[in-house]
Amino acid sequence: MTVDLTVDLGGLKLRNPVMPASGCFGFGREYSEYYSLDTLGAVVVKATTLKPRLGNPTPRVTEVTGGMLNAIGLANPGLSKVLTEELPWLERQNVPIFVNVAGDTVEDYCSVVDEVCRSGLAQAIELNVSCPNVELGGLAFGVNSSVLRGLVEEVRKVCTLPLYVKLSPNVTRIQDLAVAAASGGADGLSLINTLVGMQIDLATRKPALANKTGGLSGPAIKPVAVRMVYEVAREVNLPIVGMGGICSGRDVAEFIMAGAWAVEVGTANFTDPYACPRIVAELKSFMEAEGIKNLEEIRGCAL
Amino acid sequence: MLVKESKQLTRDVFALTLEGQFDYDKVTAGRFVHVLIEDGKAHPLRRPISIASCDSHAKTLTLVYRVVGDGTLWLSKRIRGDTVSLLGPLGKGFVAPHKPGKVLIVGGGVGVPPLFQLAKELVQENFELDIVLGFRSQGDVFWTEEFAQFGRVTVCTEDGSLGEKGFVTAVIDVTNDWTTLYSCGPKAMLKALRNHFAGSTIQGYVSLEERMACGVGACWGCTCLDPSGSLAKRICKEGPVFSWEEVSL
Ligand SMILES: Cc1cc2nc3c(=O)[nH]c(=O)nc-3n(C[C@H](O)[C@H](O)[C@H](O)COP(=O)(O)OP(=O)(O)OC[C@H]3O[C@@H](n4cnc5c(N)ncnc54)[C@H](O)[C@@H]3O)c2cc1C
Ligand SMILES: Cc1cc2nc3c(=O)[nH]c(=O)nc-3n(C[C@H](O)[C@H](O)[C@H](O)COP(=O)(O)O)c2cc1C
Ligand code: FES
């Protein structure tokens, strides 16, 4: 049986639903030494901000059971270098590019989105309104419905590419934020970003991360992510990119059944540098074994 | 790779020799491997461990590590025939001296292992080596005889239970005519060494440690700063070895 892995995200066609998650794949160069990036559905690049950012002091990553905490703090080379040095290279790898955008102010977001769209180097924007690490670095936008809607409306005015809003799980009712992003003009939603966590180092008796708190990711958060994708899919009729702890093709199938159209893979790249292509192959075998011809057949079937 | 031998060197330091398929040609002293703990399910992050010794003819690789937590504890329980998954070699290793002459090698604690492969490589290129190895106490000392085949070895312990008493800087005479210094160990030691040689023309290299996630340069978890504090460098990619004027210690 031949299975069809392609996804049509409102006109943006992906060869398969698997893309590396923002912040876990740089701008693609490092993992391109392990496999060809054209095996991926798309690449979501590191959060890009107007000015270069060094991020938080180290230690800024640590392991917890079944996951990790990070407080990278949006370290990135800044818009101008991303446009001149990173995206032109990535564009040659023959894979759709989602540019993850972060900022401190509405103006920052709009300037970055505007320039990325004008550059012609990206296929979609993913608005990071949920990074829990930098003071004002997104959290204020992602946890309040009217603030989020206001931001999305402004960005929408300058955004000529498909606009995905990446939701924070650190809220009481994620579907309310999803509705706000949709009414602000989002073309799709991606979820979830990391959950705020903390680890205490027993030797120093202080938080293990210099930033004290960090974002929890990895297999430990998968049930939370699946639940949130399910809740959002029931209330909002937009393409959903699901993520949180995905490590295998079966995990992808679970997200699709909960209502996701495509998925992102983050922390699993660190455990296995070949995680993304392996997950694509596993998903294909799963579908073959289950007699599933295409993803639409199972999308949202659990709802 | 397959475990060939696991040997306990001190109460908490082990040497693990692995054999089998590996990119041996790409090994240079100072590079590291990223070690998967079990199947990665409970431990999604690999552990960075320096290559202590590599024999590309025998196709073996040796890692020397201290048991400090779950990952290294699991590693210490591997026996002959077990499989351990490694990623690597990763990072940038030590650069050969720019001019002929005498070289100083300084190791502290589990910073000593990568300097073994370095000493081996430098002796093959006919450099003359002085080697200073610092440990906490007599019970922590390992591999000093192994190093003796490569040069003059001075051992110091903080409590004086073996060799000279005190820190490594106490036994290093800055007026000596070394061209190059290579060092790996606690940051306090690296800093003390750089201060010790302030004003000297010696070319210093240090190997740094930081918590890592990807190990390949993609996550920006492991950065350090240049002396001006305005430029970040990834320890897993641009390092772990840096010339000591490139980084703030
Ligand atoms: C480039 C490099 C080379 C290294 N080479 C050696 C070596 O040759 N021999 C040796 O004994 N040790 C070495 N280390 C330190 C070694 O990585 C840690 O001791 C080890 O990761 C601890 O793992 P654990 O699970 O036992 O400890 P845990 O404390 O349970 O580990 C929890 C998390 O913290 C990280 N971590 C803890 N301590 C360190 C540390 N000192 N540096 C970086 N990450 C840490 C672990 O990788 C893991 O992600 C090296 C570190 C780096 C960065
Ligand atoms: C080291 C690291 C850096 C991250 N950086 C970003 C980022 O820059 N922008 C963003 O939107 N999300 C970022 N994330 C969140 C991931 O994209 C993803 O939402 C989250 O890790 C959950 O997926 P996972 O469990 O598969 O890792 C980062 C996550 C990690 C672990
Ligand atoms: S550990 Fe990811 S960049 Fe160094």
Image (cartoon, coloured by chain):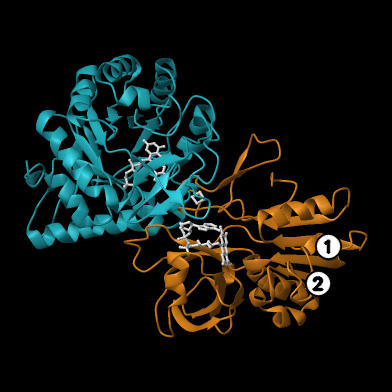
Residue found 35% across the figure and 45% down from its top = A216
Q: Mark 2 points at which residue?
A: B164
Q: What residue type is labelled 1?
A: Ala
In the rendered image, residue A210, in percent from the top left (x then y), is placed at 52, 42
The numbered mark at residue B170 is: 1
Left or right relative to B195: residue A197: left
Q: Answer with mark 1 or mark 2, whichever residue precedes in sequence.
A: 2
In the rendered image, residue A128, in percent from the top left (x then y), is placed at 36, 30
Which chain gets the cyan colouring?
Answer: A
**Is label 2 in a helix, a strand or a loop?**
strand
Residue found 29% across the figure and 33% down from its top = A170
In which chain is the residue bearing label 1? Answer: B
Label 1 neighbourhood size at 10 Å, few (<14), some (14-19), many (20+)? Answer: few
Image mark count: 2
User: Can residue B240 be seen in the rendering of this structure?
Assistant: yes
The numbered mark at residue B186 is: none
**Is label 1 in a helix, a strand or a loop?**
helix
Residue found 70% across the figure and 35% down from its top = B228
In the rendered image, residue A204, in percent from the top left (x then y), is placed at 53, 51
Q: Colour of chain B?
A: orange
Label 2 neighbourhood size at 10 Å, few (<14), some (14-19), many (20+)? Answer: some
Left or right relative to A236: residue A210: right
The reply to whether discs 1 and 2 touch (Cβ–Cβ < 8 Å) is: yes
Given residues A163 and A67, the one toward you in this image is A67
In the rendered image, residue B201, in percent from the top left (x then y), is placed at 88, 52
Q: Which amino acid does label 2 sit on?
A: Glu
Image quarter (top left, top right, bottom left or bottom right) of the N terminus of chain B = bottom left
In which chain is the residue bearing label 2? Answer: B
Left or right relative to B87: residue B227: right
Given residues A207 and A248, the one toward you in this image is A207
